[in-house]
Image (spheres, helix red, strand yellow):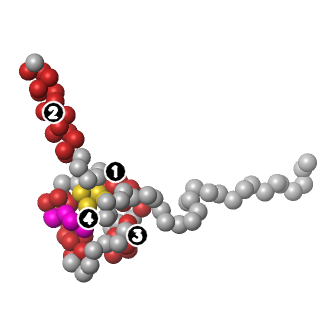
Amino acid sequence: MFKKILTTTALLFSLSSFAAVDVNKANAADLDGIKGIGPSLSGKILKERNKGNFKDWPDLMHRVSGMGDKSSAKLSAQGLTVNGSAYQGSTSSEPATNKPADKPKAGKS
């Protein structure tokens, strides 16, 4: 019986530790609790948020230096959200991995 209680308690703690943190509602401690955000980045986020809430991920990335595609994806995976939304990736219309099709070589057939 003790093992069941201990297991249930551990499960509840693990679930609560992955609670989403919304960038527009979080305080410095909440932001610092996200792996990858330290005092410097949380300070930048809070300073920019004082000018107005972030509309979406591209707005956050544009206004806070150091926030790019890779860091946004990592922070989102750790539970950071903007208006309750997780990061969905680059906003460009074409994926960066697309390469032009190889052209046939002239000469040999």
Mark 1 neighbour class, 10 Å CA radius: few under 14, some 14 to 19, many 20 or more = some
Residue 8: x and y in percent read 16, 30
Amino acid type, mark 4 = Val
- Between discs 3 and 2, the one toward the N terminus: 2
Q: In this view, does 12 lie above or below 95?
A: above
Residue under label 2: 10
* Front one among 41 and 10: 10
x 38%, y 66%: residue: 57
Quadrant for the N terminus, please. top left
Span of residues in magenta: 24-28
x 14%, y 23%: residue: 4
> Which element carries disc 3, helix, strand or loop?
helix
Residue 23's tag is 4
The span from disc 3 to disc 2 (Cα, nearest Å) is 36 Å
Residue under label 3: 58
- Between discs 2 and 1, the one toward the N terminus: 2
What secondary structure characterizes most of the magenta part? loop
Extreme residue in the left direction: 2
Mark 3 neighbour class, 10 Å CA radius: few under 14, some 14 to 19, many 20 or more = some
Q: Is residue 73 left or right of residue 93?
A: left
Q: Quadrant of residue 33?
A: bottom left
Extreme residue in the bottom direction: 51
